[in-house]
Amino acid sequence: MAIAKGLANGFPLSGVVSRKDLTDKLIPGSMGGTYAGHAVSCAAAVAVTDAFREEKVLDNVFARSSELLSALKVLREDPEVGSVIVDVRGQGLMVAVEFASPSYSPADPALVSSAPKNLASRVAKRCMEKGLLILTTSIYEVIRFIPPLNISQGDLQKGCQIFVESLKEVVREV
């Protein structure tokens, strides 16, 4: 498994995680890279690990993830907008909502001719107007939630509320 990004909180660092029996087969000096082993970056990674432990970041991720997924699954059951939500998926605090679309191929089960066009981008725009920055992703009608790992319960609830309001407003516009 290759790891990077937040490992050193912005300092250039990456790593490879593997079973010992595989890494024992590597020839010394054969594994390296641009972001491997810089002393300052390694120190930053240790500090990040310490902060994760001291601030109980993963405990917060588990709690907020459960709350986010629950809120989105309730929304999926909402008679007003549930029919346009194809899927809610993700792990931790990287969660996606996929919407139905009238533009998908006829073989795609997410094709719903009555669904609003460009729903993901329209909802994202409405969220932004209300102060919530959220991303669309992929070639499909998908919105991705990637809040900070230390997001508070109150901020998450506020974000979910804005998302629900925005989705309902956009669906009503049709």
Image (tube, helix red, strand yellow):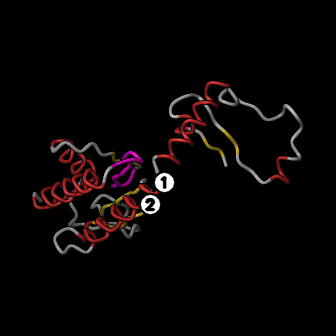
Q: Is residue 137 left or right of residue 35?
A: left
Start-end of magenta stretch: 139-151
Q: Is residue 36 above or below residue 63?
A: above
Which residue appears farthest toward the left when viewing the image? 173
**x%, y% of residue 26?**
86, 42
Looking at the image, which residue is at 65% across and 45% down?
Answer: 2
What residue appears at the point 35 percent right and 60 percent down from the top-left corner? Answer: 98
Residue 34, horizontal then vertical, whole percent: 67, 26
Disc 1 is placed on an element classified as: helix
96 left or right of 35 in image: left
Please give the label number shown on residue 14.
none
The amino acid pointed to by label 2 is Phe
Q: Is residue 130 magenta?
A: no
Which residue is painted at 39% across and 47% down in the image?
Answer: 150
Q: Residue at x 21, y 53 (%)?
A: 158
Answer whether residue 142 is magenta in the image: yes
* Residue 137 vertical position relative to residue 91 in the rendered view, above or below: above
Query: Quadrant of residue 135 in the image?
Result: top left
Query: Residue 118 or 92: which is nearer the viewer?
Result: 92
Q: Are marks 2 and 1 in contact (CB under 8 Å)?
A: yes
Q: Which mark is residue 58?
A: 1
Label 1 crowd bin: few (<14), some (14–19), many (20+), radius 10 Å: some
Q: Amino acid at mark 1?
A: Leu
User: Crowdedness of circle 2 by 10 Å Cα count: few (<14), some, many (20+)?
Assistant: some
Can you tell which mark lies on residue 62? 2
